[in-house]
Amino acid sequence: MEFVRSIWENDKEYITLIEDLLENEDLLKLDEITHHHYTTRLIHSLFVSYVSYKVAKRLKLDVRAIARAGLLHDFFHENREEIASLNEGSHNHVHPKIAVKNAQQLTELSELEMDIILKHMFLTTRKVGLPRYKESFVVTCVDKYCAINEISTPVRIKVKQKITEWSMKLRVVHA
């Protein structure tokens, strides 16, 4: 399953906000990492970024910060085992710190963007503290929405296929 490229690629305002980031090879390597079992980390990050950007526009929030930080929120290449070997805490606690460090090497981050990235896992770990900005809450919620969507969509497709198969068998039996 892939977040539909034509949706975000055809939004010129959105692309203007993130196009410099999409030129970075390290960020593009996230497309080689499976994320949530069915997608890649880059596609997930674009999904979070774009949906957050659309929410931010409606709520009149900082669309630039939310689009950029949303894209960078999972900017890390380590897997769960590598993060666990750091002995700094859970994956949910450590990966935002790695993402901020990597993002700072790519671009200058505002205080708002750092808060968005660092606090995007606050619902799943107590150690990060509460987000300081509305934009941070938006990305946190959208991240969870996107993760649930990414995980459940393939499952829903399989269930629908099974139901179709069963209904076809029932039609044959009752014919």
Image: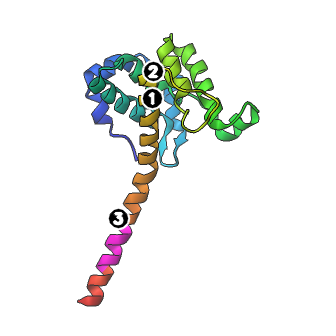
Q: Is residue 132 left or right of residue 16?
A: right
Distance between mark 3 and mark 2 Cα atoms: 40 Å
Compared to 158, does 29 lie above or below?
above
Q: Please, what is the three-letter code of the amino acid marked with disc 1?
A: Phe
For label 1, the residue is 137
Whichever of callouts 1 and 3 sits on the residue coming sooner in the sequence is: 1
SS at circle 3: helix
Distance between mark 1 and mark 3 Cα atoms: 33 Å
Q: Are marks 1 and 2 in contact (CB under 8 Å)?
A: yes
Compared to 91, does 17 lie above or below?
above
Q: Which residues are magenta?
A: 160-168
Q: Nearer the viewer, residue 95 or 157?
A: 95
Query: Residue at coordinates 29% horizontally, 20% vertically from top-left?
Result: 60
For label 2, the residue is 133
SS at circle 2: loop
For label 3, the residue is 160
Dot 1: within a 10 Å radius of its alpha carbon, few (fewer than 14), some, or many (20 or more) residues?
many
Mark 1 or 3, which is nearer the eye? Answer: 1
In this rendering, does residue 72 appear at all?
yes
**Magenta segment main secondary structure:** helix
